[in-house]
């Protein structure tokens, strides 16, 4: 084998092949073929041992020279190729940040929250202050201070979930009112919105978990007229000037006298329709003058002070407002329903 011929041959291969190579990978394949462990130039180096000591340095220098030349050509080609490939991939993978995209889905508050916020707005506008409290409550606050002693039959209507004999899931937000009376001095004007619990079976109008907003006013000379005026203002603010209230006698252990309060049916504005069963009225809340016994138990002098209280069911208002006939829909979290109610 003629070493010089082979070197020439290698040079020619590089000159001929290199310009046609299309990728850095192809350049590396060529590099391996010529300079790799089993490459052609490497094989030539191995033949040096068989040469005479006079020939060896000359031929060795010649091989090295070609090897350097090849290495340089390949490095240049690889670099140029890399730059081109980078540019190409940049062009290919460019992201057009100005391209319009699908609008992001926007959530909204739950209908119960919407109603609660609206009522809070309404009553804070009338001078009430919001007070919130624990959902896990002492029997003492939830029942005893509300004039519902242990084993009293009136507890049946508010059967609940007991943690133990003394700790219950609150059945109304009235315990917050007891807490307010025990810690504050009149005048007291608070509303207590929140989640409450009762051992009720689930159906279209009942749920073991629901929401209320109760209100309490305690001051000197508070009368039933103030209760009525407050609820009238609330009804008109919520539904319009033509809506009015109707009081019907009722019973609650914590109020005396007590009244169920109806509002003019919002659907027919009092004319009578399917929703109000032709009466023109919708039952919306319970209310009454705070039982003097409750005032006394909560440390308030019932000779000097009197008060009124009311409790509004938020589910009922939401159902009327949005025309929902089954309460369960409010808890299922179905976006198809929720996205309609904003
Ligand atoms: N606490 C009563 C209930 O949850 C509602 C109510 C509050 C009634 C205040 C009268 C006065 O059923």
Image (tube, rainbow, N blue to C red):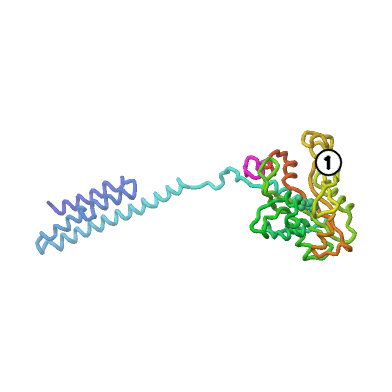
**Where residue 29 sits: x, y (%)?**
28, 50
At horizontal 90% and vertical 59% (from top left) the residue drawn is: 221
**Where residue 92 sits: x, y (%)?**
45, 45
Q: Nearer the viewer, residue 36 or 106?
A: 106
Q: Nearer the viewer, residue 248 or 123?
A: 248
Give the extent of the magenta segment.
328-340
Q: Nearer the viewer, residue 74 or 284?
A: 284
**Where residue 69 sits: x, y (%)?**
26, 56
Q: Which residue is mark 1?
A: 264
- Element class at badge 1: strand
Quadrant in the picture for the C terminus:
top right
Asked whether residue 322 appears in the rendered view, the answer is yes
At horizontal 75% and vertical 62% (from top left) the residue drawn is: 179
Q: Nearer the viewer, residue 106 or 304?
A: 304
Give above or below for 276 relative to 110: above
Q: Residue furthest left?
A: 52
Question: In screen coordinates, is 50 left or right of 176?
Answer: left
Give the quadrant of residue 320.
Answer: top right
Question: In screen coordinates, is 313 left or right of 271?
Answer: left
Residue 287 highlighted magenta (yes or no):
no
At horizontal 71% and vertical 50% (from top left) the residue drawn is: 211
Give the quadrant of residue 48.
Answer: bottom left
**Where residue 31 sits: x, y (%)?**
27, 52
């Amino acid at each position: 084998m003629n070493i010089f011929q082979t070197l020439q041959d290698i040079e020619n291969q590089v000159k001929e092949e290199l310009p046609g190579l299309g990728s850095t990978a192809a350049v590396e394949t060529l590099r391996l073929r010529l300079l790799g462990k089993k490459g052609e130039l490497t094989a030539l180096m191995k033949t040096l041992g068989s040469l005479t000591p006079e020939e060896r340095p000359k031929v060795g220098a010649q091989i090295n020279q070609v090897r350097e030349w090849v290495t340089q050509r390949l490095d240049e080609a690889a670099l140029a190729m890399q730059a081109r490939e980078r540019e190409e991939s940049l062009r290919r993978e460019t992201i057009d940040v100005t391209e319009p995209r699908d609008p992001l889905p926007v959530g909204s508050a739950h209908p119960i929250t919407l109603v609660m916020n609206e009522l809070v707005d309404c009553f804070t506008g009338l001078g009430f202050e919001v007070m919130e409290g624990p959902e896990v409550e002492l029997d003492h606050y939830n029942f005893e201070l509300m004039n519902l002693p242990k084993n009293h039959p009136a507890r049946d209507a508010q059967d609940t979930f007991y943690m133990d004999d003394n700790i219950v899931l609150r059945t109304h937000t009235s315990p917050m009112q007891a807490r307010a009376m025990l810690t504050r001095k009149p005048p007291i004007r608070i509303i207590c919105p929140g989640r409450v619990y009762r051992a009720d079976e689930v159906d279209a109008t009942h749920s073991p978990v629901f929401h209320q907003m109760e209100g309490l006013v305690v001051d000197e000379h508070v009368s039933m007229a103030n209760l009525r005026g407050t609820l009238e203002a609330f009804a008109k603010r919520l539904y319009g000037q033509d809506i009015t209230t109707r009081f019907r006698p009722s019973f609650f252990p914590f109020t005396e006298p007590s009244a169920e309060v109806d509002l003019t049916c919002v659907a027919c504005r009092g004319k009578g329709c399917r929703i109000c069963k032709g009466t023109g009225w919708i039952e919306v809340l319970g209310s009454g003058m705070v039982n003097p016994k409750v005032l006394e138990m909560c440390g308030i002098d019932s000779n000097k002070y009197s008060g009124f209280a009311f409790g509004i069911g938020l589910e009922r208002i939401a159902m009327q407002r949005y025309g929902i006939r089954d309460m369960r829909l409010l808890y299922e979290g179905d976006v198809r329903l929720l996205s309609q109610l904003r």
